[in-house]
Image (cartoon, rainbow, N blue to C red):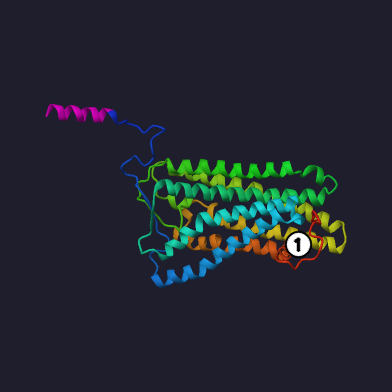
Amino acid sequence: MGIIMSRMEALRSSVPTEPGPAMSPWANGTAPREFVILGFSGWPPWLRALLFALLLPLYLATLAGNLLILGLAAADRALRTPMYFFLGALSAVEAAYSLVLTPRMLAGFLLPPGGQAVAPATCAAQMGLFVALGGAECLLLAAMALDRYLAICRPLDYPRLMTAGLCWGLLASCCAGGSVLALGLTAAIFRLPFCRGGAVNHVFCDLPAVLVLACGDRERQERVLLAACLLLLVLPLALILLSYARVLLVILGAGGAAGRRRAFHTVGSHLTVAVLHYGCATAMYARPLRSRSLDEDKLVSLVYINLTPLLYPAIYTLRNRDVRGALLRVVGHGPPGAGRQARVT
């Protein structure tokens, strides 16, 4: 008995009373050992099978469209300009975004009721990648607006200002900004104790759906989330609107009808994508938890995960003559002069 008591005393003394920085946030016994993504597991099987059949072609078309634009921007000499450099980068981000979210969501439609069990590390990784890619996309749209502003409003200085080094620097800054934001938000949320179970009422480990499971000082984390979302949404959107307002004034004041029409098409494509992206992001995340319904968020997610990314390559392909020409050259029906450099406007 004395030996047993001494070993128990040694075990108690070896366990720290407070979690140190190296301890996992799930070391607390009240925290879930796994998260369960509920998705639409409560819906009838026939309806889930129908959704799978409808959304799988959209996912494949989204992936193919974005990869096609990325390939054209990289391979076609006529598209080796800053505008198409950023368009190719945006397509790469969208393709990665689809790969992070959509396959697991589609698999959830085919699994038995009860949801998908995922490890905490997997849930955190999915959340971090989602935030990083979404943040990089917000910043990339602002970089594209800056490129159009310089090309149209300062055409003589454009070749000197928008160099290859600046393009890569802007791209690296966009990716770094999204990654830093993702790391900070994900760490802030997963450091909280989760005392409300591990059932995530969403199709993936989205920030609000995981945050509602936490206890402790959740309001502070929610304020951080709202501040980060507003910072990431309001500032780039303000830059985009100011840039394109100036661009429209220049277009209306100079140039022939053909040049104005071409510039309007380019600006219209960029503005359409920006409105879609920022509109969905603002509607989803610029709201406090108490004013949202996770069931409604789940339904809205079907739009911004499946439909909105599909519209981006369609908008840029159908409204852009250079991209259409590059596509025709790839399939062998394009006009001669494939080496001609695309005009910056």
Q: Viewer-proximal residue, 239 or 260? A: 260
Residue 16 x, y percent position in the rendering: 32, 30
Q: Quadrant of the C terminus?
A: bottom right
Q: Is residue 293 visible?
A: no
Does the segment drawn in magenta span residue 7? Answer: yes
- Report the residue at 56% width, 53% height from top: 96
Residue sitting farthest toward the left: 1
Q: In which quarter of the image is the N terminus?
A: top left
Residue under label 1, please give it.
Answer: 265
- Report the residue at 76% width, 43% height from top: 163
- Report the residue at 51% width, 54% height from top: 100
Q: Is residue 252 visible?
A: yes
Taking 33 as reference, is 129 left or right?
Answer: right
Magenta span covers which residues? 1-13
Taking 224 as reference, is 23 left or right?
Answer: left
Residue 321 x, y percent position in the rendering: 76, 63
Q: Viewer-proximal residue, 95 or 261? A: 95
Reply above or below: 252 against 229. Answer: below
Residue 210 x, y percent position in the rendering: 43, 50
Residue 313 appears in which quarter of the rendering?
Answer: bottom right
Residue 25 x, y percent position in the rendering: 39, 40
Q: How crowded is mark 1: few (under 14 residues within 10 Å), some or many (20 or more)?
A: some
Prevalent SS, magenta region:
helix
Does the segment drawn in magenta span residue 240? Answer: no
- Report the residue at 77% width, 56% height from top: 78
Residue 121 appears in which quarter of the rendering?
Answer: top left
Residue 333 appears in which quarter of the rendering?
Answer: bottom right
For label 1, the SS is: helix
Taking 176 as reference, is 191 left or right?
Answer: left
Residue sitting farthest toward the front: 332
Taking 156 as reference, is 139 left or right?
Answer: left
